[in-house]
Image (cartoon, rainbow, N blue to C red):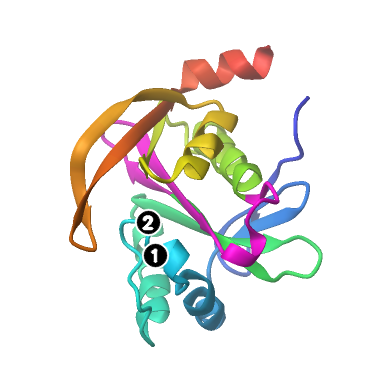
């Protein structure tokens, strides 16, 4: 059964906007910075993601949000604030880092710990996958997770990504080398699953 997905161009923010069953995915605004700092600043989030620092210092969220517009306009990145549909509070973030030359993108996401185990990440990631294939016309979307973060792997599996292998001791986080589990999905895989 197809899940709810409404895509439109947000004239106010000059950014894509996606509505799902329970969520609105929209562009970040500087007003989101304190919520980003609070949610992403949780040690549990930072320890499972490559680029989120801990402690999450003042000004880091504003700087991060400030990079979105230019990279979006250059076709390199689209980052969405994951917000609750009715009340609008911030839940997390998701997005695509785009390689235009190869028509692919890397999917990334995080969900604030108060909102874990509600299916929000899967719902948001599924919508971003659809946006990547249907709106951006990508041919491949891929993602990685730390081997010890099996919950992230379950999200990748739930949205139809296939396991592609392990990159052993591929990155270093907090002075520890981490194995990365690699997943990917092709446009043809996505189309086949949609028909089935």
Give the residue number, with chain letter if any, for mark 1: 46
Q: Which quadrant holds residue 47? A: bottom left
Could you classify mark 1 by the number of other residues whose Cα lies within 10 Å: few (under 14), some (14-19), or many (20 or more)?
many
Whether residue 24 can be seen here: yes
* Cβ atoms at labels 2 and 1 below 8 Å apart: yes
Q: Position of residue 98 (x, y in %)?
A: 35, 44
Residue farthest along the right direction in this orientation: 86
Q: Residue at x 47, y 31 (%)?
A: 137
Q: Which residue is mark 2?
A: 49
Question: In the figure, residue 52 lies in which quadrant?
Answer: bottom left
Could you tell me which secondary element the residue under label 1 belongs to?
helix
* Res 159 seen here: no
Measured along the vertical axis of the image, is residue 144 above or below residue 83? above
**Residue at (55, 22) in percent of width and height:** 190
Q: Is residue 167 left or right of residue 95?
A: left
| Residue range (magenta) | 96-120
How far across and down, in percent of the image, does residue 84 sit?
A: 72, 62
């Amino acid at each position: 059964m197809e899940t709810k997905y409404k895509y439109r161009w947000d004239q106010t923010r000059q950014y894509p906007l996606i509505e799902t069953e329970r969520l609105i995915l929209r562009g970040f605004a500087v007003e989101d910075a304190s919520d980003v700092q609070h949610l992403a600043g949780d040690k549990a989030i930072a320890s499972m993601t490559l680029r989120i620092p801990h402690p999450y210092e003042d000004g880091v969220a504003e700087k991060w949000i400030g990079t979105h517009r230019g990279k979006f306009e250059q076709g390199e990145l689209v980052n969405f604030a994951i917000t609750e549909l009715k009340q609008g509070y911030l839940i997390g973030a998701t997005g695509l880092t785009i390689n235009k030359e190869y028509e692919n993108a890397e999917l990334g996401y995080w969900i604030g710990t108060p909102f874990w185990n509600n299916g929000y990440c899967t719902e948001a990631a599924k919508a971003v996958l659809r946006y990547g294939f249907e709106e951006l016309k990508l041919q491949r979307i891929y993602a990685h997770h730390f081997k010890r973060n099996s919950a992230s792997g379950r999200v990748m599996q739930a949205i139809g990504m296939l396991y592609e292998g392990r990159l052993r001791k591929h990155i270093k986080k907090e002075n520890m080398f981490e194995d990365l589990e690699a997943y990917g999905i092709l446009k043809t895989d996505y189309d086949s699953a949609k028909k089935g």
